[in-house]
Amino acid sequence: MVDEKVRVGLALVLLALLAVAAFYGTRYWQATQGAWTRVVSQVDCDLNRGPCRQPLSGGAVVFSVLPSTIPLMKPLSLSLVTDGVQVDAVVVEIRGLNMDMGLNRTRLERTAEHVWSGETILPVCSQRKMEWEAAVLLEMEGRFEVPFRFHTTRP
């Protein structure tokens, strides 16, 4: 009887130690990952009017969403063209600005030299006009977050 209680107690202590080690190991791993540098847009551009160009690190990136009417609950084509910058990976996180709409993250694939593409769908919102930000996350010599704004109108 005592032996079983000792074994259960030791197992619980071991599990607790493993949980603490996993927690601190994850925190250490996260701390070693490079932070994203948010690029402050100096260009007043609205994706509803067409592609937006953002100067970046000796070059530029051009981001677009098609169709430019940006409908809800329909497939959207996301495209990034790089000009004078070498990009290793691209992820687009679309965030609701006037209401939390959950995570909408799309990894773009390189489809040609300097061209990255992907698809997503935006959910319907209870608000008639929804403001959005497409945060384009670029992994290159550093990690950059380039924000682009747009809006949708619920029919």
Image (tube, grey):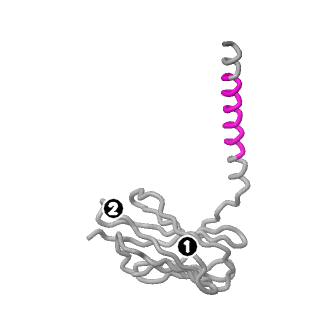
Res. 22 image quadrant: top right
| Observer-nearest of 54 and 69 | 69
**What residue sits 60% from the left and 72% below the top?**
90
Q: Amino acid at mark 2?
A: Cys
**Number of residues whose C-alpha sits closer than 10 Å to that of mark 1, classed few (under 14), some (14–19) or many (20 or more):** some
Q: Which residues are magenta?
A: 8-25
Image quadrant occupied by the C terminus: bottom left
Residue with the mark numbered 1: 41
**What residue sits 48% from the left and 83% below the top?**
51
- Could you tell which of marks 2 and 1 lies nearer the N-terminus? 1
| Observer-nearest of 17 and 124 | 17
**Number of residues whose C-alpha sits closer than 10 Å to that of mark 2, classed few (under 14), some (14–19) or many (20 or more):** some
Q: Position of residue 2 (x, y in %)?
A: 69, 13
Can residue 92 be seen in this snapshot? yes
| Observer-nearest of 103 and 142 | 103
**How many numbered marks appear?**
2
**What residue sits 56% from the left and 70% below the top?**
107
- For label 2, the SS is loop
Q: Give how far apart the Cα atoms at labels 2 and 1 are.
A: 26 Å
Query: Depth-wise, is mark 2 or mark 1 nearer the camera?
Result: 2
Can residue 40 be seen in this snapshot? no
Q: Amino acid at mark 1?
A: Ser
Judge left or right: residue 104 versus residue 72. right
Image quadrant occupied by the N terminus: top right
Res. 125 image quadrant: bottom left
**What residue sits 40% from the left and 78% below the top?**
48
Residue with the mark numbered 2: 125
Residue 98 versus residue 154 in the image, above or below: above
- The residue at the far top in this view is 1
